[in-house]
Image (cartoon, helix red, strand yellow):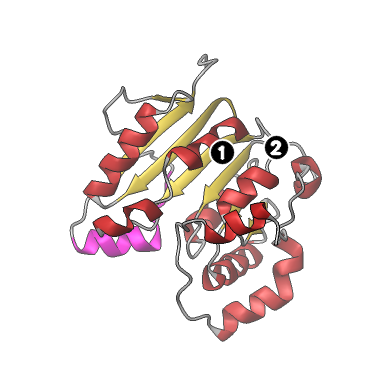
Amino acid sequence: MAPTEKARLSRVRSYAIRGRITSAQKEALYRHWHDFGIDYSPELLILDRVFGRAAPRILEVGSGMGDCTAALADRYRENDYLAVEVHRPGVGSLLRHAVSLGLSNVRIISHDVMDVLRDQLPERSLDEVYIFFPDPWPKKRHHKRRLVNVRFLDLLVPRMKDNARLFLATDLADLAGDMLRVCDAHAGLVNLAGKGNFAPRPAWRPATKFERRGKRGNQPAWELCFARAGSMSG
């Protein structure tokens, strides 16, 4: 095995595969993956070819069960949405949403986002990036598994266009502070709420399934909004 392959296999993952897949989700994967799915390959994607047009491109990292992705793609059909989700139940659920809503502006990659960023997404190709309620890994010994870290941002930021926005949300105070600290410290990002500050909730962001569960427990959400540093006009 090549050294680079060994490094990838030994890398700390930001996710753990879990959850049962339903028969309906399995059927959606079987019937509709070829319509919406992009198989991982270490080759750059030509996104205009993938979506069949030129349009604003939004990357959602960890689309969960796909309810938020589908709602946004339905509401803003002028945008293209690329969802990266490793959990097969979530992928199957998003496929079902996409079919039922008649969406043509959604594509899905079911693979580790670190590989997707490094190998598949061209530089300066993204207009917005959404990371809503990532796995919090609340135990201190698991903090190294949290998605938003320097290594992740070093891959993500070059894929963002000038003025591209990065939106994040979580209902865990410790994770919120961690993401704020890491993003504030990155030279490629500017906090649009002011360094050290959380942002107001974007009016356009639908509540996710996990957020609705949290609200029943009176859990607040912390929002963050950053822009790629550089040209900041508009």
Let me know if residue 193 is in the magenta part. no
- Residue 81 in view in this figure: no
Query: What secondary structure is found at the residue carrying circle 2?
Result: loop
Residue marked by disc 2 = 122
Residue 69 in the image, given as x and y percentages of width and height:
53, 54
Image mark for residue 155? 1
Q: Residues within 10 Å of mark 1 (few under 14, many from 20)?
A: some
State whether residue 179 appears in this view.
yes
161 left or right of 184 in image: right
Marks 1 & 2, CB-CB < 8 Å contact: no
Which SS does the magenta portion mostly show?
Answer: helix
Q: Residue at x 55, y 15 (%)?
A: 231
Name the element at disc 1: helix
Is residue 210 within the magenta segment? yes
Residue 201 figure quarter: top left
Disc nearer the start of the sequence (1/2) = 2
Amino acid on which disc 2 is placed: Pro
Q: Which residues are magenta?
A: 205-217
Q: Residue at x 22, y 64 (%)?
A: 216
Front in this rendered view, residue 51 or 184: 184
Question: Which amino acid type is marked by label 1?
Answer: Leu
The front one of 27 and 181 is: 181
Return the x and y of residue 234 as percentages of the image width and height: 52, 17
Q: Residue at x 73, y 76 (%)?
A: 31
Q: Quadrant of the N terminus?
A: bottom right
Q: Is residue 143 left or right of residue 173?
A: right
> Where in the figure is residue 17, as x and y percent of width and height?
48, 71
Residue at horizontal 47 percent and vertical 62 percent from the top: 64
What's the distance in space between the residues labelled 1 and 2, CA to CA?
A: 11 Å
| Quarter of the image where one finds residue 214 | bottom left
Mark toward the viewer: 1 or 2: 1
